[in-house]
Image: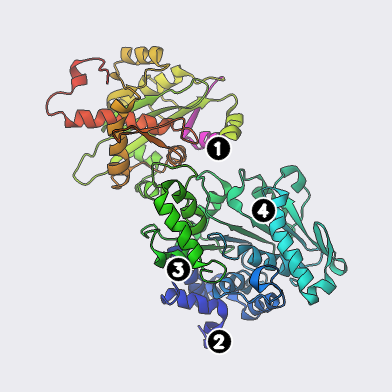
């Protein structure tokens, strides 16, 4: 690396972060390490950093004027972290001279100047990127939300004399007649997005998008542009099944080197998993503008309120500290849950566990909805984790409607083999029976009772009489399991506080189960006992309920020193 390259603001930030002179979270450090590494070896992949191009964009920002607050009318001087983002997006080039990055994903806490940064990027793409007929869109879930970044850009134009002379303004349109270029706000209505040819798209608050249609339409619409840019800006979200979480996870894979994608830039600012969210020293990791646009006293007040009022903790962790959470008071920490995936995916676990002893839990819920069977395998050796396989069934008819209704991709999960879609508009209990104890393979492979040593299957009595009777006739030990505190409290506490919190579980990263884990809520009785609460949970939790029943029976049986009770009694009521 040359001395000149090191002095460039983009690289200066990366060097300071890596040296520990600027406090940053793990993913930001990885982004900085990637930049420095590519300066050394990017040429081997046809990449180079055009310092002049990056400086040109940074200089463009100084010609803009702030439109609000105490800096209104003042030039926009980017903070060093902002120089890093902008410099990387516009400075990195391919061997053909075109920009390297097609997508820029930026995630950080609120009140850190994301809208100002995004508005400036939009104006550069419109005015100074040498793209005839440039179409630049500020996109969001609704047109009013899209106007936030667009309106900031419009105010910048009005306050910046150089731009005001060149850019024509209408209510929802900024245009340059000489180049036939325009910038407009765009609501995430799939029909209104047909026919777009974007050179640049700013996607505001991606976490609020309830479907991926807008993202997909924008991505596919850029095919005729030589160097399009999709710049997504967002806070952390509250759903693990969303287009934003998808892009977050992909960004992490790129930063960690699990995916090679030289066209994808990511800047993910959040406190780290091991950080105490109450510690002021870590807040800057999610708030790179702390002390500038984000006032420390404001953040301290928000955290103090959250400490005293637990119901405020999730919003504070998500909006101000970059942690992905749910809106309700939830049971499981999803960072810890992710750490419990284990080394093997579900398909590998199914093979690895063949012949092993396990305990089952069967939750049939409603016949026109999901049904779940959990098989829980106790450790076979000292230090081994408990292993978990969960199988799901749903009716084939109406699966896409249910997916829209529940905002969960049942149809995709069915295609991937995590859900078996049974014929008709209700769950086919015969299909479940045959998969458990039939004489031919089903959607999940050979019958489970022959593939694994199932000691017993606990079941919720509701709606299960016929199937349970049939399975008993097939030789499967079926044990009724109550759904009240008396039965559910012990496995609920054991699962949450020992297996998950202690990272003693391997669930194989089953996406259906992880979706359920991300929103399961619990309720507490006066004695402090906990149990999963279907009513308070924001989505379905059948797989977790089945798992808790399996654990309840497993812990009872594993604690028995003599023959298991169910070995001598066909049905035991708990």
Which-is-in-front pick, marks 3 and 2? 3
Q: Name the residue under label 2.
A: 4
Q: What stretch is highlighted in magenta?
A: 408-424
Element type at mark 3: loop
Q: How crowded is mark 1: few (under 14 residues within 10 Å), some or many (20 or more)?
A: some
Find the distance from the CA under tag 3 to the CA under tag 4.
30 Å
Q: Earlier in the sequence, mark 3 or mark 1?
A: 3
Q: Is residue 257 above or below residue 337?
A: below
Percent position of residue 99, x then y: 65, 69
Find the distance from the CA under tag 2 to the CA under tag 4.
36 Å
Q: Earlier in the sequence, mark 2 or mark 4?
A: 2
Percent position of residue 357, x then y: 25, 31
Element type at mark 2: helix
In the rendered structure, the answer to whether residue 160 lies left or right of residue 258 reads right
Q: Mark 3 points at which residue?
A: 24
Percent position of residue 57, x then y: 67, 75
In the rendered structure, the answer to whether residue 233 lies left or right of residue 250 reads right
Instruction: Determine the residue positioned at 45% across, 62% down.
Output: 300
Element type at mark 4: helix
In the rendered structure, the answer to whether residue 331 lies left or right of residue 125 reads left
Answer with the quarter of the image where residue 200 lies: bottom right
Q: Which of 439 and 198 is in front in this view?
A: 198
Q: How crowded is mark 2: few (under 14 residues within 10 Å), some or many (20 or more)?
A: few
Q: Which of marks 3 and 2 is nearer the N terminus?
A: 2
Find the distance from the CA under tag 3 to the CA under tag 2.
24 Å
Find the distance from the CA under tag 1 to the CA under tag 4.
20 Å
Q: Name the residue under label 1.
A: 409
Percent position of residue 404, x then y: 60, 34
Find the distance from the CA under tag 3 to the CA under tag 1.
34 Å
Q: Mark 4 points at which residue?
A: 219
Instruction: Determine the residue positioned at 52% across, 45% down.
Output: 239
């Amino acid at each position: 690396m040359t001395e000149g390259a090191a002095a460039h603001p983009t690289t200066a930030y990366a060097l300071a972060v890596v040296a520990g002179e600027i406090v940053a979270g793990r993913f930001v450090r990885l982004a900085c390490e990637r930049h420095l590494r590519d300066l050394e070896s990017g040429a081997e992949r046809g990449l180079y950093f055009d310092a002049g191009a990056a400086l040109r964009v940074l200089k463009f920002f100084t010609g803009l004027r702030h439109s609000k607050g105490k800096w209104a009318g003042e030039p926009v001087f980017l903070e060093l972290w902002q120089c890093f983002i902008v410099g990387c997006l516009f400075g990195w080039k391919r061997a053909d001279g075109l920009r390297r990055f097609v997508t820029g994903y930026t995630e950080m806490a609120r009140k850190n100047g994301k809208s100002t940064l995004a508005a400036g990027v939009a104006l550069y793409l419109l005015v100074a990127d040498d793209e005839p007929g440039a179409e630049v869109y500020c996109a969001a879930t609704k047109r009013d939300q899209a106007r936030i970044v667009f309106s900031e850009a419009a105010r910048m134009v009005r306050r910046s004399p150089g731009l005001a002379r060149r850019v024509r303004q209408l209510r929802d349109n900024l245009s340059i007649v000489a180049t036939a270029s325009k910038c407009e706000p765009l609501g995430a209505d799939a029909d209104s997005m047909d026919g777009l040819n974007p050179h640049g798209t700013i996607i505001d608050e991606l976490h609020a998008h309830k479907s991926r249609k807008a993202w997909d339409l924008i991505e596919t619409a850029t095919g005729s542009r030589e160097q399009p840019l999709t710049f997504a800006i967002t806070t952390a979200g509250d759903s693990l099944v969303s287009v934003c979480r998808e892009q977050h996870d992909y960004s992490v894979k790129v930063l960690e080197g699990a995916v090679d994608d030289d066209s994808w830039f990511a800047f993910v600012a959040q406190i780290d998993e091991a950080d105490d969210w109450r510690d002021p020293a870590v807040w800057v990791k999610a708030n790179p503008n702390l002390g500038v646009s984000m006032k420390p006293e404001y953040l301290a007040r928000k955290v103090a309120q959250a400490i005293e009022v637990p119901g405020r903790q999730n919003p504070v962790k998500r909006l101000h500290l970059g942690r992905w959470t749910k809106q309700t008071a939830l049971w499981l920490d999803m960072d810890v849950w992710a750490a419990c995936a284990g080394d093997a995916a579900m398909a590998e676990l199914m093979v690895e566990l063949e012949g092993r002893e396990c305990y089952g839990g069967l939750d049939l819920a409603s016949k026109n909805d999901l049904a779940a069977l959990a098989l829980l395998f106790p450790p076979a050796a000292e230090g081994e984790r408990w292993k978990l396989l969960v199988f799901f069934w749903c009716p084939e008819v109406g699966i896409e409607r249910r997916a829209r209704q529940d905002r969960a991709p049942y149809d995709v999960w069915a295609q991937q083999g995590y859900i078996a879609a049974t014929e008709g508009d209700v769950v086919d209990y015969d299909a479940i029976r045959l998969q458990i104890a039939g004489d031919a393979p089903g959607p999940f492979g050979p019958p489970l009772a022959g593939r694994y040593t199932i000691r017993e299957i606990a079941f919720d009595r509701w709606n299960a009489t016929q199937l349970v009777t049939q399975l008993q006739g097939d030789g499967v030990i079926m044990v009724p399991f109550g759904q009240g505190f008396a039965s559910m409290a012990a496995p609920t506490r054991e699962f949450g506080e020992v297996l998950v919190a202690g990272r003693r579980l391997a669930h194989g990263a089953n996406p259906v189960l992880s979706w359920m884990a991300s929103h399961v809520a619990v309720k507490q009785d006066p004695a402090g006992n906990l149990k999963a609460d279907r009513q308070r949970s924001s989505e379905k939790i059948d797989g977790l309920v089945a798992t808790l029943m399996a654990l309840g029976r497993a812990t009872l049986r594993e604690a028995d020193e003599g023959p298991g009770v169910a070995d001598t009694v066909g049905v035991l009521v708990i």
